[in-house]
Image: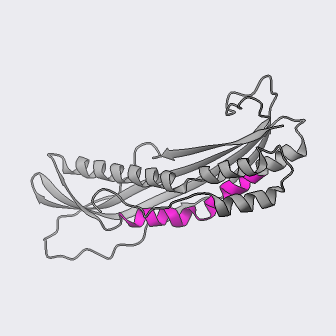
């Protein structure tokens, strides 16, 4: 028997980025207010068990590889919105200070399995679920660390429409935050190691022990969050 997990890291910007744009004209000697921390909303994990008919799997089910019976589909999502204050310096230039970042995080997990699959296969897929949830436990701290590198940053924009240029900057920062989150979260190596330890659920290794070993020994090289300009 065989099984596997499927991991998708989705980045969403919620359509058009919500922009809170304080269009304030200030003299250069005025001091900016203290910048608050980013707001991180780590929503509860959503989980579903779904059965399928192997000869006719549903359209929304990720495809199984040859010889596989079941899979755990773990979807990490992030949605960022960015805003700030804009100080116009002349007709075509302004200094933008990023003062507000909101990041919403989600994890949606679905275990797909035929109705007659063995309990051992389901147990294996539950191990993949545990690994995904383990990474999600600290996802808020990760998002906060990434977002904090932008909070309070001052960037000069130029153009004939300074409001539009400021909005463009906020959209760019939101994209960078969600991209970096997806890059650094990276549960893939741990999931692959888990499959190696368990031979994709074919052997009799205890799932709890396999999960613990994979989490402990996965090769990861976390790097501090950086972005252009730092």
Q: Is residue 182 magenta?
A: no
Coordinates of residue 219 in the picture (x, y in percent) = 58, 57
Residue at figure coordinates x 30%, y 56% from the top left: 228
Residue 45 in view of the camera: no
Nearest the viewer among 128 and 200 is 200
Instruction: Look at the picture and state if 187 lies above or below 31.
Output: above
Q: Main secondary structure of the magenta part?
A: helix
What residue range appears in magenta?
127-150
Measuring from the top left, give residue 52's x and y in whole percent. Answer: 80, 32
Question: Front-most of 112 and 225?
Answer: 225
Residue 47, image x and y in percent?
Answer: 72, 50
Looking at this view, name the residue that lies furthest to the left: 90
132 within the magenta span: yes
Residue under the image location 68 percent in, 31 percent down: 63
Which corner quadrant holds the N terminus?
top right
Q: Residue at x 31, y 61 (%)?
A: 84
Horizontally, residue 50 falls left or right of residue 21, namely: right
Q: Position of residue 42 (x, y in %)?
A: 58, 61
Can residue 180 be seen by looking at this rendering? yes
């Amino acid at each position: 028997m065989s099984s596997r997990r499927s991991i998708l890291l989705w980045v969403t910007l919620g359509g058009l980025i919500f922009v809170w744009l304080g269009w304030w004209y200030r003299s250069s000697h005025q001091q900016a207010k203290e910048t608050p921390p980013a707001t991180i909303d780590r929503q509860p994990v959503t989980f579903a068990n779904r059965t399928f008919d192997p000869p006719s799997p549903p359209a929304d089910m990720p495809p199984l590889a040859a010889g596989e019976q079941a899979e755990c589909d773990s979807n990490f999502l992030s949605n960022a919105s960015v805003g700030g204050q804009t100080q116009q310096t002349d007709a075509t230039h302004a200094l933008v200070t990023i003062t507000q970042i909101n990041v919403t995080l989600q994890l949606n997990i679905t275990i797909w399995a035929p109705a007659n699959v063995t309990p051992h296969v389901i147990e294996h897929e539950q191990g993949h679920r545990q690994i995904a949830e383990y990474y999600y436990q600290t996802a808020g701290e990760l998002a906060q660390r990434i977002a904090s590198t932008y909070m309070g940053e001052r960037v000069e924009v130029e153009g004939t429409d300074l409001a539009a240029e400021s909005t463009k900057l906020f959209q760019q920062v939101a994209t960078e935050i969600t991209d970096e989150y997806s890059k650094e979260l990276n549960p893939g190596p741990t999931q692959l190691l888990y499959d190696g330890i368990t031979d994709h659920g074919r052997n009799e290794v205890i799932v709890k022990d396999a999960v613990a070993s994979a989490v402990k020994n996965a090769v990861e090289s976390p790097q501090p969050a950086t972005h252009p300009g730092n």
